[in-house]
Each structure stands twice: as C-alpha cells, then as structure tokens.
Amino acid sequence: MASPMNSSKKISKAVIVSISSDIGYALAKRWQQRGMKVGGTYRTPSSLVDDLQSSGVKTIYCDLADSRSVHEAGVSLRHDFSQWDYLVLCPGMLEPVGSFIDGDFAAWEKSLEINFTRQVQFVHELLPSRNKTGDHPPVVLFFAGGGTNNATVDYSAYTISKIALIKICELLDAEIPDTNFVIIGPGWVKTKIHQATLKAGKKAGANYQKTIDRLASDQCTPMETILDCCDWLIQADRRVVSGRNFSVVFDKWGEASLVRKLEEDPHMYKLRREGNDWK
C-alpha cells in the first residue's frame, strides 16, 4: 500500500493520542518509518514509550481523566505539530466492567470522560492547527469498539462511549467540510485493553471465558491489517469515508465495489433509524 504522504512531498505530520497503546504504538512506528513526523500522548511510562522516544518520536504526558491535562497537552501539540495532517485518537478503557445498577456511577462517568469527552476535547484543542493547504483534507481518525450493534451486557459505559464517537464523526463531518472525520472498529485485537475483563472475573459474565478463548485463538485481527485499513482511510476520498464507521473485519475496505456504493449512498455506515421501520 502506498505511503500516506502528501503528493507535494511535504513531510506529513501525525498526532496520535494514546501513542503508548498497542495500536497507537504500531501506527507511530509504521508512519515514522515511512518518513512522517509523528508525536502523541501517553499516561503511563513504559518500554513502548521509551522506544518511541529513543527513535525520535515526540511524546507528551497526558492524563485523559483530567481536562486541564488535556488542554496542556493540546497547547504543546499545537506548537510542535502545527499544520498537522492526521489526528488519531485511540485511547480505550473497558472499565467499569459489571452491571450498571451494581456499579460505581463515578467510575461509569469517568469511563465516558476518557472514552469520549476528553477525546473530543482533544479534537477541539487541535482542529485550529490542522493543515488546510494540502492536496488532501486533514483527517481525524477515531476507534470504535465491540457492542455497538447489540446490547453488550456489563460494558455499558464503554459501549455508550463508542456509539457517541460514531455519531460525533457524522456531526463534525457535516459541520466541518474541509476535514475528514472517520471511525473504525478493529475487531478483536490482542491488546492490553482485555486485561480489564480478565481482572473483572465473574463481573464480566460470559465475556470472561469468551475473552480467554478468543485471545488464545488465531481469530484476532492482525495488527498489520488494522494499520493497512488506517492507511486506506486517511488517503481515501472524502465522499467515501468521512462521517462513517468502518469495520476492519467485515467491510471490504479498499475494494472498488465498496467505494462505488459509498459514493452513491451517503447513509451507509452511519447510525440510522431509517430502514428499520415496519410498513
């Protein structure tokens, strides 16, 4: 797949919020190796952060549970990555795992803040410094998660947050026509996020054993496939991707047949009540 660089040969700039996550780290390494200027945020020091820093990737501390910390990180990123081309937001936490009625509401609310509100705050902080002069619109890329197509018991905060992210993409796409807003669901990936389910044990219900079985299988989405999908999304035409929710696993992204359908139908891959009515 072609390198996600502007045709003008200008060095593209990418900001990755939660660059120390497994997907964020993999994206950062791939894009830096392709000549992009890459930077992003982390909360917990780790070997991944050390490796990024040693390879010249700009990393900035940020606690997504703290709006002031998000603002301060945003100020720093606006300075270091003025005229950015790609903004990727890949934080995610499954906690609190367990039934809504038995859980701690403060923890439930914190989950919404980290999984939705603070991510949107980052977009608000950084949009003014996007590159609007390139050959391709700047791109904001979010990550969706499991449970958006049904009732995922015991993961209400996480699921609601992901649904909100899906809709904000469509809303921002309608309001800001010079920027692409896209969200993708990577499917089951062998990342640190699943530790919350394993730690929750019985509170996770049937998902506890399901997670154990899936992580032990060969049915998880390969990281390279996720990265390839990200590359396709950030280069695709606005009419094809902006405002939409894509599945890495189930959608035929990159195929001409899907591109044609998306160009013809502005409602595809968006949250809709239409088409689900009884006549």
Image (cartoon, helix red, strand yellow):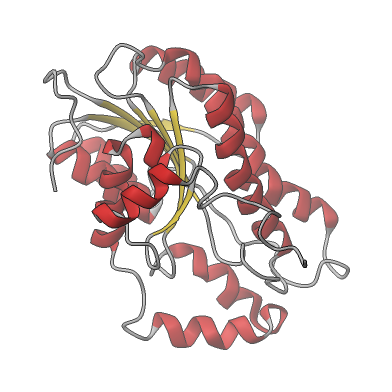
Q: Which residue sits at x=41%, y=80%?
A: 215
In depth, the one of 192 and 254 nearer the eye is: 254
In depth, the one of 23 and 58 nearer the eye is: 23
- Can you give x and y, in whole percent of width and height, for residue 27 in the image? 28, 46
- Can you give x and y, in whole percent of width and height, for residue 72 in the image? 54, 20
Please state the total of marks drawn on the protein image: 0
Q: Which residue sits at x=55%, y=38%?
A: 169
Left or right of 132 in this view: 210: right
Outermost residue on the front side: it is 279
Left or right of 37 in this view: 118: right
In this rendering, the answer to whether 189 lies above or below 207 is above
In this rendering, the answer to whether 256 lies above or below 278 is above
- Can you give x and y, in whole percent of width and height, for residue 278 in the image? 77, 67
In depth, the one of 212 and 134 nearer the eye is: 134
Left or right of 57 in this view: 198: right
Where the C terminus falls, by quadrant?
bottom right
In depth, the one of 86 and 243 nearer the eye is: 243
Q: Which residue sits at x=50%, y=47%?
A: 91
In this rendering, the answer to whether 101 lies above or below 214 is above
Q: Which residue sits at x=56%, y=77%?
A: 198
Q: Is residue 169 visible?
A: yes
Q: Is residue 122 visible?
A: no
Quarter of the rendering containing residue 116: top right
Outermost residue on the right side: it is 101
- Can you give x and y, in whole percent of width and height, for residue 170 in the image? 57, 38
In this rendering, the answer to whether 207 lies above or below 155 is below
Quarter of the rendering containing residue 6: top left
